[in-house]
Image (tube, grey):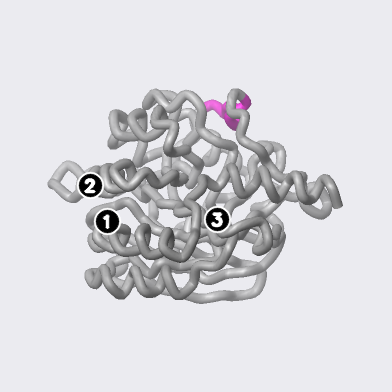
Amino acid sequence: MITLVRRCAALCALGTLTAALAGCAGDTATSSGHAGRPARPPATAAPSASAAPTLAPGPAGLTPVFENGSRKGGRTVALTFDADMTADQGPRAAAGERFDNPALVATLRRLKVPATFFMTGRWAEEYPAQARDIGRDPLFEVANHSYSHHAFTGSCYGLPTVPAARMRTDMERAFTAFRSAGVEHPVPYFRFPGGCYDQRSLRALAPGGVTAVQWDVVSGDAFATDSGAVARQVLDGVRPGSVVVMHCTRSAAPATERALRTIVPKLRERGFRFVRVSEQIGRAGAAGARS
């Protein structure tokens, strides 16, 4: 099932905040947020080499928005992980703060769980070897979470705002950062910083040919220390076709890897099969083409 507009249930992992926020307002949908430094590199196209499916443009040619797969197409679930880091967090990383989570990636591999990673360009610049390693693993796919992690709407948890004229450039800079790190085939999916979007941002990104990916299950892992609570929230929310938003940053989501050790076997016991977002979008697009 494709939902094109105005749904939100999100969490905010701002580097300047000490708690996760959730909410919904007007034409905005929300997830996790940070701030970053401005920059304008030469624009490059969205990943044309990727064979990953996209959805047809929405009304008036706007960027299409995907929130979850079909509820009737089998018991599939997509785990997605936001690799959040912003340009202004470099000094914190240099001082020892960890925005990566190799143990989480190792757990996904050990449990043979496909997953989609939404990286910021700045994260790929900070951890190029890890970005390349994830991007080359057929179990995973790398998608775009912007370069700067500035908001693409005028109001999004207090995040600085990317001007409309620079939104596409910010997205394309992240694709450039992925390729520089050695991620050869990022998928043409985009997750808005903070999950916040409106018609203006959907219009700005439309020429890039991406599909915006939201979610229908919030893990609540931002700044959580109780892995059991995170696991329960996911297990209570998952339905066939669900997209779960989680994080793979140790400093902002320290309990996520432990929660996975509960989430994965429990969902498998319920008959769920883990898939990448591309599989869900491919099925949704095919269903739309037949209707």
Q: CA distance from mark 1 to mark 2?
A: 7 Å
Q: Are marks 1 and 2 in contact (CB under 8 Å)?
A: yes
Residue 248 is marked as none
SS at mark 1 in the image: helix
Q: CA distance from mark 2 to mark 3?
A: 24 Å
Q: Tag 2: residue type?
A: Ala
- Which comes sooner in the sequence, label 3 or label 1? 3
Instruction: Name the residue: 41% across, 51% down.
Output: 82
Disc 3 target residue: 76
State yes or no: residue 44 in magenta. yes
Closer to the eye: label 3 or 1: 3
Look at the magenta stretch and give its main secondary structure: loop
Q: Position of residue 12 (x, y in %)?
A: 41, 66
Q: Which residues are magenta?
A: 42-48
Q: Nearer the viewer, residue 144 or 239?
A: 239
- Which comes sooner in the sequence, label 2 or label 3? 3
Instruction: Name the residue: 65% across, 53% down.
Output: 201
Disc 2 target residue: 103
Indicate whether 267 appears above or below 170.
below
- Quarter of the picture holding the N terminus: bottom right
Disc 1 target residue: 257
Rate crowding at label 3 as few (under 14), some (14 to 19) or many (20 or more) other CA atoms within 10 Å. Answer: many
Q: Tag 3: residue type?
A: Thr
Closer to the eye: label 2 or 3: 3
Q: Position of residue 275 (x, y in %)?
A: 51, 47
For residue 193, say whether it is visible.
yes
